[in-house]
Each structure stands twice: as structure tokens, then as C-alpha cells.
Image (cartoon, rainbow, N blue to C red):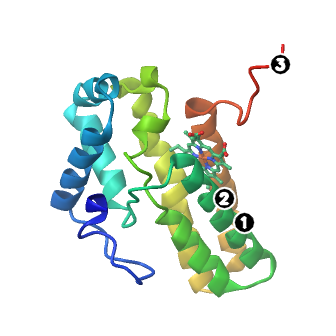
Amino acid sequence: MLLCAGVTVAGEQQPMAPDMKQVQQLMKQQIGLMKPELQKRVKALSPKTKKMLLTIYAQHSRHSAKVTLRQVMHEVLSDYQSMAAGIMTDNAEQTADSARRLTNHRIPRGGLLPYMNLDQINDNSLAALDGFNASVEGTAKRLADAADQGDMGKAASYMDDITGGCVGCHAMFRGVPGQSSLLR
Ligand code: HEC
């Protein structure tokens, strides 16, 4: 639970985003959870990559000490579907709330990096994260604002960019979910 200290306020839907100092502290704690081979790679990242990761983490106020990235991704998918349902039923409030929940998705135990391939923990590969984050979180924020203004057509037009961000990141950092090693 230490990991959450000062960041998640129990009972609040949208707790305050952590400041940079808190995020630096969080990242230190995340590194402490990592096995030496991952720690080594994270420590070797350039200041620019580290700053980019810190900036992404600072945009999220929910840092979990328990859940895995897979669990977060299923929660993200639920928010994405609820956002689409809001658009399809002309429910601006559901749309905006779900989009903001998606934007502020939980950060899993140990951060994002432990769930990626070890050989992708380098400056080159991780540079792509910034763009995927902008496509998903940045666009979902704009979608929420459009819904707030009652412009559901404009809100709908953002779905493409968000979906592209999900698919792009999966193409780069994820394999096919649930593949079996028992098939030829
Ligand atoms: C920053 C990169 C990134 C972005 C952006 C991203 N994902 Fe993922 N996603 C991953 C990774 C990595 C995994 C594999 C996690 C694992 O298996 O440990 C994953 C896995 C998943 C899974 C499969 C979970 C399982 O049980 O195997 C779903 C569903 C999913 N993501 C939904 C989404 C949706 C919806 C979006 C966009 C709104 C999205 N993701 C955006 C990186 C990303």
C-alpha cells in the first residue's frame, strides 16, 4: 500500500494527480519492485526517456499496488466500450465520464515496463509510448470535452484516433493474447 501513499484518496472518483516529486518517489518504489535484469535496463534509460515516463505517470492519479497491466487493460476496454455506448445512445454524460475514466486509467503494480519484453526496455522502443499515450489519453480528453459541449458528432470523430492508439501500441508491445504453446 505504501506505493499509493499520498496519491489515491479513498472514496474519491477523481483524486488529485500526483506532483512531479511524488511521481519520482513512485518511480523509485516501482524500480525497487523490479528484478535486477529489468532494474539494470531501466536505470540505463536516458534522462529524456525517464522524463517522458514520469510525465505519463503524472497524468494518472491511480497507481495500484496490486493489479497487473492485463487487469488494467480489461478495465480500459470496459471504459472504452462504455464511452462508445454513450455516443451511440446520445448520452453525453456517460460519454464524458467514461472517456475521463479511460484517460485516468490505473497504473499497474511496478508501472508499465515490467509487462513489456525485456529487449524493448530501451530508449528507441520506448520513445513510441509518447505517441500512443497522446493518441489514447490525449484524444479521449478531447472527446470528453466535445461530449460536454453536446457535440456528439465531434466526440464520435475521435474514436478512430483512440482505437489507432490501442492497436498501434499492441502491435509494438504485445503479442496475440492467449496464444498456446501446445499448438504446432
Ligand atoms: C502503452 C501501450 C498500450 C496502449 C496505448 C494500449 N494497450 Fe492494451 N495492452 C498493452 C500491453 C503491453 C498488453 C499486454 C499485457 C500483458 O499481457 O501483460 C495489452 C493488452 C490488452 C488487452 C488484452 C488483455 C489480455 O487479457 O490479454 C486488451 C483487451 C487491451 N490491451 C485493451 C486496450 C484498449 C481498449 C486500449 C485503448 C483504449 C489499449 N489496450 C491501449 C499495451 C497497450
Give 154 or 38, whichever is nearer the viewer: 38
Is 10 situated left or right of 172 in this image?
Answer: left
Kind of residue sitting beneath label 2: Leu
Give 60 or 63, whichever is nearer the viewer: 63
Residue occupied by mark 3: 183
Q: Horizontal and vertical percent for residue 144? A: 56, 75
Kind of residue sitting beneath label 3: Leu
The reply to whether residue 142 is visible in this rendering is: no
The reply to whether residue 31 is visible in this rendering is: yes
Question: Label 2 vs label 3: CA separation?
Answer: 28 Å
Mark 2 close to ligand 1, CB under 8 Å? yes
| Residue sitting at the far left | 21
Q: Tell me the quadrant of the picture where the C terminus can be found.
A: top right
Q: Horizontal and vertical percent for residue 11? A: 41, 84
Residue occupied by mark 1: 81
Quadrant of residue 23 in the image?
Answer: bottom left
Residue occupied by mark 2: 77
Q: Horizontal and vertical percent for residue 48? A: 24, 36
